[in-house]
Amino acid sequence: MLAAAYAKGLPEKIDEIETMWNQLLASWSLQTMRDLHRVVHNLAGNGKIFGFPELSAEARTLEQMLKQLLQQDIPADETQSDKIFLQIAELKRIFTENESKSSESIIQTIAKAHDDSSVNQVFVVDHDAEAAEELALQLRYYGYAVEIFDRIDKFQEAMQQKPDAVVLMEVEFPDDAMGGIHAMDKVHRMLGHFARVMFISAHDNMEFRLEAVRVGGVAYFVKPFNPLELINQLDLITASQEQDSFRILIVDDNQTTLSYHTTLLERAGMAVKTVSDPLSLMAVLKDFNPDLILMDLYMLKCSGIELAKVIRQLDGFVSTPIVYLSTENDFNTQVEAMSLNGDDFLIKPVVPRQLTSTVTMRVMRARALHSLMTHDSLTGLLNHTAIKEEMVREVVRANRLSTPLSFAMVDIDFFDKINDRYGYAAGDRMIKSLSRLLKQRLRGTDVIGRYGGEEFAVIMNDTDATAGARVIDEVRNVFSRLVHTGNDEEFSASFSCGIADVVNFQDAASLIEAAEKALFQAKQRGRNKVVVVASDD
């Protein structure tokens, strides 16, 4: 097992780091420093993936220390030497503590991490090991499981075992200018279908791009490229193709046709609620919150047009698509119905394919428009208004069900200074980076929004403030170790966070105010920390 072998080799790896550092103290050598940096870099990149996240984090800190010396090309002074010595000692301490666990416990922990189906597998294929490791390190920070291959044959063997992996393929190899493209062609013929592959190349011309597309390339990045842009594309490719089922409400007082249309839409994977008595619509409408309403035009107690007028007067349903169903085939009647609060008109009996395609098209369009109105354009998160509205709903739900809920306010530290020094583009990239990290590290049930500028809001359902603080603090720790670029410089940043929960603050307004006060306290206490407000005292 690779993970077990990695754990077994860690003592030797840490001893190697210490030995190389002692050699450097005795006799400074630029080449030895480069070798040491590479060893520590690999430890930082691989530790977490094999079940040693704390070791990986501390190795990353050591790597940054060594990188600074490497760039200056000078021996370490006494202060720097002491810091590096202490950091190596910290690596030893962390491994010793992990070693004290039973080997079975460690292997179970590692196996659980590797069996987690929520982690996307990425294969990085590049003959340049250092460049591949640098890219892999960034990918791992965003929750991707990464394997690196510098040989095409080993990569192709791995694809047979994990055909669903996303491939980041270097185009040029020493013996073949299109080696990566030719390798993917072989993978395609071996698997019988295209693998998901993104190409990286020094060539930006039509010939290379066409060949990449012909072997299934879904993206093409020209060197030098911004890793954040590549990760953006990777997020899109690996995003679950599944989405929330379309919620369809059918209103029809004919039970036979009601059952028929329900069966058709449920077979298409949609969630369906039915109303046979139009006068009982109100309760179902607000509880179900449909994506689309399928409504008979003529019903005994009221007409579909009359019911549509009522629906349009309700908050939150002004733009919900309404599709009429009727045996009426008179064109003028159809136009009139659609001009009076309707969006489409289907004639009974409806062809099954026409019903599902019409409903699908209308729902997808409505969801897209709703997303534009409620989501921030830079990050894709809920905007200020939407996150506050969601907050009100979630607090009401938590109080009604007596379940915990915590609310976190997150703010990037010294953001204005970062903009001034590294440029506004770098600031935007940092905002996108943090938004992605939050989405990657938090649960799908958590609600994340961009509250404004460099400030974010997080609603954590079924989570009290103490548990929420632990989760956000893990994100804070990872974010502080990310490397950003701007104006040809590398830099890192941090964020502060304030958290409160519904146990102490029962309504949305007071909960938001409490979290903002906690955030202010975090900044007063030196920033780069998470503060929890226990009560309103």
Image: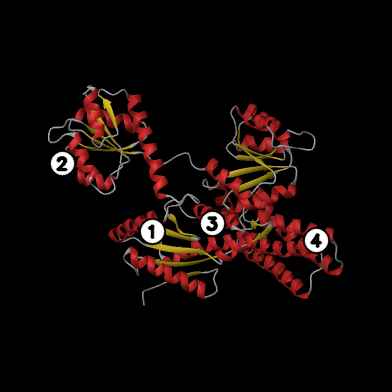
- The residue beneath circle 1 is 462
Q: Position of residue 528 (x, y in %)?
A: 55, 68
Q: Amino acid at mark 1?
A: Asp
Q: Amino acid at mark 2?
A: Leu
- Above or below: residue 114 compared with residue 264: below
Instruction: Assess disc 4: are there few (<14), some (14-19) or many (≥20) residues with their C-alpha within 10 Å of its C-alpha.
Output: many
Residue at far left of view: 301
Of 390 and 83, nearer the camera is 390
Nearer the camera: disc 1 or disc 4: 4
- The residue beneath circle 3 is 431
| Secondary structure beneath label 2 | helix
Q: Quadrant of the C terminus?
A: bottom left
Nearer the camera: disc 3 or disc 2: 3
Q: Closer to the N terminus: mark 1 or mark 4? A: 4
Measured in 3D between alpha carbons, the distance from the residue under mark 2 to the one under mark 1, in whole angstroms, is 36 Å
Q: Closer to the N terminus: mark 2 or mark 1? A: 2
- Above or below: residue 448 compared with residue 191: below
Residue occupying image coordinates x 70% and y 30%:
182
| Secondary structure beneath label 1 | loop
Q: Can residue 457 be seen here?
A: yes
Q: Position of residue 523 (x, y in %)?
A: 51, 72
Residue occupying image coordinates x 71% and y 54%:
42
Left or right: 67, with 394 as reference point: right
Nearer the camera: disc 4 or disc 3: 3
Q: Are marks 1 and 3 in contact (CB under 8 Å)?
A: no
- Quarter of the rendering containing residue 128: top right
Measured in 3D between alpha carbons, the distance from the residue under mark 1 to the one under mark 4, in whole angstroms, is 49 Å
Q: Are marks 1 and 4 in contact (CB under 8 Å)?
A: no
Q: Position of residue 338 (x, y in %)?
A: 26, 32
Residue at far bottom of view: 537
Q: Amino acid at mark 3?
A: Ile
